[in-house]
Image (tube, helix red, strand yellow):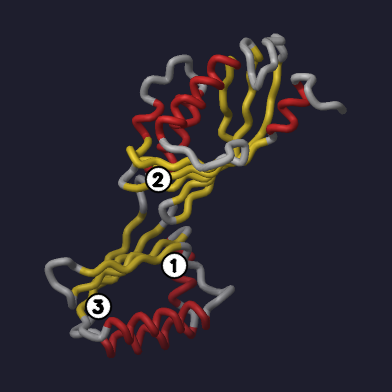
Amino acid sequence: MTFVQLIDCRTSRFDEMNRLMDAWVEKTGGKRTATHALIGRDRSDASHFVEIVEFPSYDEAMRNSRLPETGRIFQDMVALCEGAPAFTDLDVVRDEPLDRATARGFFAEAGRAGAEALFERFTDDYVGHDPANPRDTGLRAAREEYAGWRRAFEFSFTVEDQIAQGDRVCTRWSWHGTHKGEFLGIPATGQQVAMTGTTWHRFRDGRIRESWWQYDRAGLLEQLGVLGE
């Protein structure tokens, strides 16, 4: 079970504490078991900080605490605090990566005819990057491009894998379709086609602000008989 530790402290020497954390990361490289660390400052009290550290489990957190480097850094950290830090130990009982779920929902919705709600996931100033397009596109162009794919194919996506980092989510997907209408001047063939690809989505306030697409367009054209074996 994922374990999270909250460390609540007050300090007027945060820059020194920040350098201390950098030193701990460097000294424990390859040995520490923490998977994610985040520090927040209280908007109403600039000397109040809360650090959130995530571990794969409570046992891994304890193993991390027993590292000699951790003990030494902790003593130095206490010396920078105004009073003893307060610790809260939490077993994670719900973990919902919302941006990743939104990206997954995008691909599920994109495979449905109509997909009226598809672009509600996008910001008004959305920018799309696709090597098939000569220039970056906005939301209107994205709607038109999607409509063109929908006229040419009955298709669906399968999400194969996802990773998330900061405000970005990367999705590795597979795509299967039936060629039912004109596509790049190619009349409908009724051919069953498939391709794979990867899409990075960048989020802002829970909505898709930017996308980068990479997919096997040449393989798709080969399946439609345009490119030779």
Q: Amino acid at mark 1?
A: Ala
The one of 69 and 220 positioned closer to us in this rendering: 220
Left or right: 160, with 126 as reference point: right
The relative height of residue 158 versus residue 193 in the rendered view (above or below) is below
The relative height of residue 139 versus residue 12 in the rendered view (above or below) is above
What residue is shown with label 1?
61
What residue is shown with label 2?
97
Q: Amino acid at mark 2?
A: Pro
Counting from the top left corner in percent of width and height, residue 208 is at 40, 41
Looking at the rendered structure, the secondary structure element under dot 2 is loop
Counting from the top left corner in percent of width and height, residue 223 is at 76, 22
Q: Residue at x 33, y 43 (%)?
A: 206
Counting from the top left corner in percent of width and height, residue 125 is at 35, 42
Looking at the rendered structure, the secondary structure element under dot 1 is helix
- Give the spatial CA distance, label 2 vs label 3: 29 Å
Looking at the rendered structure, the secondary structure element under dot 3 is loop
Q: Nearer the viewer, mark 1 or mark 2?
A: 2
Q: Residue at x 58, y 19 (%)?
A: 155
Counting from the top left corner in percent of width and height, residue 50 is at 26, 69
Q: Circles 1 and 2: CB distance less than 8 Å? A: no
Q: Amino acid at mark 3?
A: Pro
Q: Residue at x 44, y 52 (%)?
A: 1
Tag 2: Cα neighbours inside 10 Å, few (<14), some, or many (≥20)? few
Give the mark nearest the N terminus, 3 or 1: 1
Tag 1: Cα neighbours inside 10 Å, few (<14), some, or many (≥20)? many
The one of 179 and 192 positioned closer to us in this rendering: 179
Q: Circles 3 and 1: CB distance less than 8 Å? A: no
What residue is shown with label 3?
85
Give the mark nearest the N terminus, 2 or 3: 3
